[in-house]
Image (cartoon, rainbow, N blue to C red):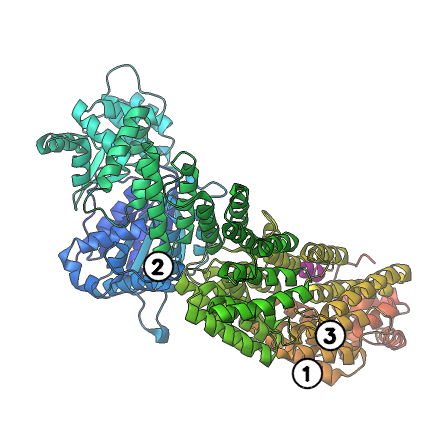
Amino acid sequence: MGGVPQTSLTSPLVGREDELARLTGVLERARAGEARAVLVAGDAGVGKTRTLDEVAARAAGAGTTVLTGHCVDLGDVGLPYLPFTEILGALAADERFAGVLAAHPVADRLLGGGPEDGGGADRSRLRLFEGVAALLTELAEVAPLLLVLEDLHWADQSSRDLLRFLLSRGVLQRPAGGARGHRLAVLASYRADDLHRRHPLRPLLAELVRLPAVERLELRPLPDADVARLVRALRDRPLPDTTVHRIVERAEGNAFYAEELVAATDAPAGGVPSGLADVLLIRFEQLSETAQQVLRTAAVAGRRVGHGLLRDAVGLPEEELEAALREAVERQLLVSADGGTYSFRHALAREAVYADLLPGERARLHGGFARLLAGPGRRSDSAAERAHHYRESHDLPEALAASLEAADHAQRVGAPAEELRHVETALDLWSAVDPAAGPDAVTLTLRASAAAVHAGELHRAVSLTRSALAGLGQDADLELAARVRYTLAGNLLSVDNQSAAYAHSSEALGLIPADPPSATWLWAAATHVTAARQVGENGSAREVGRRALAVAEELGVTDARADLLISLTSLEGANRATPQGRERLFEARELARRAGNAPVELRALFNLAIGSFESGDPEECLTWASEGLDRARRAGLLSSPYPREMRYLRLLVRYTLGQWDECVRESEEEGGPLPASGGHALGPGLYVALARGDEAAADRARALLEGPFDWMARLVAGIVLTDAAALRGDAEGAVRSMRSTVEALTDDVGTPPLATVRLAALALSAVADTVVELRRAGDETGAARWAGTAATLVEQARSSAGYGEDGTAPQGPEGQAWLARAEAEWGRTTGSGPDPGAWEKAVAAFTFGDVYERARCRLRWAEALLAADRRAEAAAEAEAVRRDADRLGARLLRERLDDLVRRGRLTDPAPGGGEGAALLTARERDVLRLLALGHSNRRIGEELFISAKTASVHVSNILGKLHAASRTEAVAVAYRQGLVAAEPAPSD
């Protein structure tokens, strides 16, 4: 199978030997069954397209199928899946691929010709993504496949999501069982200089480059010598050296600049303009008037335009149009491609021509394209383009209508971010359009709010519903006014503004009479129950919830009944961690499923998942969370609140069960088409990174605190920063981080987060270490001060563990395990020494499944056993810690274990050196090492878990065996005989 033909190459490729070798190597590996992807970065004009064209030409020549898709700048209007639609369109136009396409209806769906699934957000994006992946892999089975995606910086979010899916879970994955992988390579380019700090492509690039099969290639400016070679190669006749030198100087390594400057040397005398736009326009102005007219029209269409559309827009006879196009192609301003399309040779050329249009001319041409795209036989996915053209032509009513149509299309294909942008565009146009046309502005704003929630833009959703509330007039319909208020309440709950949510839900409930029963009152009541519970008004929530449940049953509103069952689960004694509670949640999930209400079904699945975790069954939690995420994918709701919570929960279970590699991989891959979601996606991966000694983990945690308040991001950052401070022995930092996190996460009625017990235990670890060290140094005052801090922390841990999610029953196994650790850490500060029993209890408490925390407690247990001279038991526990630390790759835990083993002599010592080594026992060699550090007998005893008196006996024996009259002389003899190595003295 041959490749889809590419545009012809019109200029030599100079100075990219290394990059070509690297990309060719990627293609060779792909042909051998090792699928790879390369992200090609570079500034505008540096040569990305030319390099990719060369690679594509070589690949096609070697029998590789080459498919190319381009992203297009349509301003703030996104056209979902545009580059993939272009690829499928090219396939559909080529009879060679008819058989493959027939087996994959995904092509018809993206091209707008296939049947559409049922309503709204329930449209299955996952099947679409899997369909594209299956199509590409089947093509790769027939012949090696190269997929080229150009200008990712202009990609719409849906295209970015699909690319994320293909690279993380689709076409690059190696089959199980050692079979050969897909013979496929993906090359994707983007302008590095276009990626400002908040550019939506940045987080995706950061994710993709962490994937094992994805690499990044940066095309840097060419050296002056290569630019000079390029300049001379572009002309049939030699250029004067001064001209070459001037072009090289001004091109500054940019191949496109150089080409344009060379082409401009044919301009009339008067000097070459200083800016690139001027250079482009000089070439443009050398064309005939007809050719200029054609290029102006093509520039309004975009980077590329079909022959038929251009012909109709420019209004020229076919012969004149062809002559003008031939002139533009020969001047290398346009490039013709198979399929009857023309494109500007570079995006900058199109931008310069477009910018030179007069305002009236620009508006007229946009209007012409809009009308043509709206004519008979228009594509079903052309609404976004029409909206763009109508808006630029100032035909605002038509722009509004097309924007709403584009929003409907985005909703049908499961692209909530694009739906939001189109609805917001419609809202921007609303004030300038007859209000009688289409839905009212408040209803439209509520739609935008819902799309924002589905897209995961929760703060934007709040802003939009506040705008809807402000837009209500004095005589507004009461049901609409109630809808706005309970929608705002629900959105405020999603950003943890409970008090305001309760106030608005109360207003909504007061606007609609409960009798006669209505669906509006019912949903207002359901929202109020959730809000009231969040602010501690459990009695009111229970009363309203029971009444609303009866109304839901009376009216047959199944999804509202499901939502109320979920809320009442924790209000009527049987919380989600109990068998009775889970039975009620399962009923709610079935009711929501029958009603087709995906958000309520996802709420039920989340509560089933977290209830399993809270009851100490992480494996069951994993099952429910995975089902919930699969449901969210099918509904196009992966970025909405409950799937984000389940995303974190599934990663947390992986972390808890010790499946750290899977946890990190899932965190990096984002689990499919999911935008980056802060703490929800990154949290457990950061816990792993910290335990494995990644020094950047704390910095990445601090970055989560930037931007608007996010509850989960704040929790994750607090856990990582508290633990990081504890690990480095910074008690003040650990306590400060713990307290600031608890304060930030305490709700409006003063209830601290359930994670307080975990944060307190982590901070107590650092405080206990500090107390022990101060006591060793004889600073009883300092030790007493920190012991007081420890007492406060353990009280916070006890209080936190005593109240679970429903505010009455104690926390489940996880909370009780953290309390056991907090109690054991606190015991270290009381002066009675480490208590083996307390640490044994902590180890047992973590057996519900937290492998790492069990190992950390087991290390403390081994330390306490050593202090009690129970050496055999200590050695057994140390060996168990070693196994877990090595399996997890927990470097910091292993280092602490090795230190304990060395100090406690839990393994056979390495042979000593020197003539005195044979005279000393293993314990005496340990004492001698500490003696050389200047330690007192008391400090030696504490380090080796022996009494000061026993240490004194060992010191006396060493003096006798080394024939030394003093401790100083014994150390000197030891250095001479090589019994100890020089070590820096400690600061104490």
Q: Residues within 10 Å of mark 2 (few under 14, many from 20)?
A: many
Q: Quadrant of the N terminus?
A: bottom left
Image position of 225 (left or right of 952): left
Rendered position, 853 above or below 390: below
- Front one among 303 and 536: 536
Closer to the observer: label 2 or label 3?
A: 3
Image position of 98 (left or right of 783): left
Q: Amino acid at mark 3?
A: Ala
Report x, y in % for residue 846: 66, 77
Q: How far is the residue under mark 2 from the one under mark 1?
A: 46 Å
Rendered position, 182 above or below 412: below
Which residue is label 2 attached to?
A: 36
Which span of residues is magenta-colored? 722-728
Q: How many numbered marks appear?
A: 3
Q: Amino acid at mark 1?
A: Ala
Q: How far is the residue under mark 1 from the one under mark 3?
A: 22 Å
Q: Which mark is residue 820?
A: 3
Q: How far is the residue under mark 2 from the one under mark 3?
A: 48 Å
**Regarding mark 3 in the picture, which secondary structure is present there?**
helix
Q: Amino acid at mark 2?
A: Arg
Image position of 134 (left or right of 470): left
Q: Residues within 10 Å of mark 1 (few under 14, many from 20)?
A: few
**Regarding mark 2 in the picture, which secondary structure is present there?**
strand
Which residue is label 1 attached to?
A: 876
Closer to the observer: label 2 or label 1?
A: 2
Report x, y in % for residue 423: 41, 45
**Regarding mark 1 in the picture, which secondary structure is present there?**
helix
- Front one among 122 and 854: 122
